[in-house]
Amino acid sequence: MATTGRSKPKKGKPSAKAKPRARPPSKPAPKPKSKLAPKLKPKAALKAPSQRPGIPSGPPHLAPKPRPQHPPVGPQRLALPPSLAREVKGTVAEWVAGEKMSRLWRGDSTLWTGRDEDRWVGWLRLVEQQRARREEFGRVSEDVRLAGFAHAVVLGMGGSSLCPDVFARTFGRVAGHPVLHVLDSTVPAQIRSLEREIDLRRTLFIVASKSGTTIEPAVLLAHFLDRTRSLLGGQAESRFVAITDPGTELERQAQREGFRKVFHGLPNVGGRFSALSHFGMVPAAAMGVSVPRLLDRALVMADACAADRPGDDNPGLVLGVVLGAAARDGMDKLTLVASPGIAGLADWIEQLVAESLGKHGKGVVPVVGEPVGPPRAGGEDRLFVYVRLSSAPSEEQDRAVAALERGGAPVVRIDLSDPSDIGQEFFRWEIATAVAGSILGVNPFDQPDVEAAKVAARKVTAAVEETGTLPPETPVLQGNGLRLFADPENARVLAGAARDSSPAGWIRAHLARLAKGDYLALNAFLEQSAPVTAALQEIRESVRATSRVATTLGFGPRFLHSTGQLHKGGPASGLFLQLTADDAEPLPIPGRRFGFGELCRAQARGDQEVLAARGRRILRVHLGADVKAGLTALRRAVAR
């Protein structure tokens, strides 16, 4: 922990070259064979750790040993108000005195809630396990390259898709390898948009589902398998691989259909903690990213976060304490600022933090993609984390964050020397989230409220299977191309608060319910296109300016697997504005009586139903068939 009070952050020169340092195993580790292995100049050796008996330096099977020189982790600097700085310092000291990092590495469930946390800590040992599979990842990369694929598409949701999305957005196209795409939507327009970007004859589909039964990848698989068979006949199955846990229905289907390959996940690693497992590393290898480099960087962070690292020098522990302590003190809006070159990392962090910590009325609300405003512009309940790519920083972000620090806002700065350092960040944030879960008293590895929305959506789709159409519903108000839907309680409140009985009047009355400490959640079951995103960003900025609250934006059904748990199980501080629309044209799902459009609307209805049942402030605005016109009407209503 470089600073705990208000001191000017020192500018550090991240080393661009260093030799990877492998933790001493029981026998010498093999040297990396990849020519892309990191070559960083070693800096001064870290302090030798204390050799307390029984305190492992990392995974339990490795005894603590003096560490040789190795490259540094990405610098992490704190600029915190004095009261929060004192609380962080005291809490870190408590963790050291209580040897809690040792308990974390052992998977001691009493560190959290004493339930089943010990069953879900396999991610702590993933880095070394995956480094032993370097040659396997090399074969994946070479097989895909030699097969001549031009595109690789991940079909998955949540933890099975967000890490590949980070790689796709961070590394772009790697010469000689296919472009990686991620499809985590049931919106027909989104699916058709992807199809226009790819050549189905030269596309590898990576179907990723830990449980093997997740509805979205299942129906996307049915669609693209049908489309590919229509073009390639019996050769279609060789264009598909699966990543799933052993023994799932997806694995059985892949074996039955003759997929190109099946890769296994680990049953003791939850989806959102699986970035460094096959769910993240196989897509990375397929697109030509150096998996050994990512894992070598992750190993450096794993060592820095080991149980016997001094408290202030343990980046995962310190970050987790900051997250937990800030949330306890009312600064529970984690506002993530990431350099443009690594912007995708923020979406991955959003899911990890929101789904892990948002339950039992507690939680941390990640805020992603919101432009940095002046200090206190969006409320005093913020903790800012700036993940900065030092090789390609944004001067605008640098100035904005510096202004936040001068204005007294709590800020954590994390510097990455190059994009491959995201391997470090996966592990840093996983440790930090586990630590914060302990501080908040929640199980960071379960998601008790996610299933409720799935059950509600299944009721709707079951009715469609029987009748062939969605069950009818009546809007509470309509006009100007908009139709509003609300449960009886929210409708009663809005009818009494609205100044006029128009959709615009009700929308303004709904937004007027925002109070200090609240946040607006825009949940859009729409195509995630540039024009739609721009319009929704404009609405976010307008609300922040007038209500001085944090705002979030999620596209459905993707957000259901990311922030959905927080929305239903976290603090009741969210105000939800859900957006839906009609399909331009139907898109059927092979083998089902309902299409993608019906499924998407069923998911929206299910989400609204559960939020209302939990007493949340929720209003659904249906934009109709003309999404552009609907968004224009919505913007006007918000701006008045």
Image: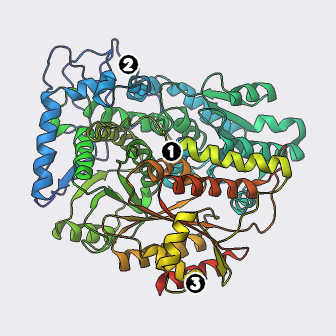
- Quarter-wise, where is residue 432 in the image? top left
Type of amino acid under label 3 = Ser
- Name the residue beneath numbered marker 3: 501
Residue at 86% across, 42% down: 229
- Name the residue beneath numbered marker 2: 29
Image coordinates of residue 214 in percent, x first then y, are 65, 39
Residue at 28% across, 46% down: 74
Residue 496 is left or right of residue 11, and the answer is right
Name which of mark 2 and mark 1 comes first in the sequence.
Answer: 2
Residue 578 is left or right of residue 38, and the answer is right
Name which of mark 3 and mark 1 comes first in the sequence.
Answer: 1
Image coordinates of residue 86 in percent, x first then y, are 10, 49
The mark lying in front, picked from 3 and 2, is 3
Residue at the extreme top of the image, as rendered: 26
Type of amino acid under label 1 = Cys
Quarter that holds the N terminus: top left
- Name the residue beneath numbered marker 1: 163
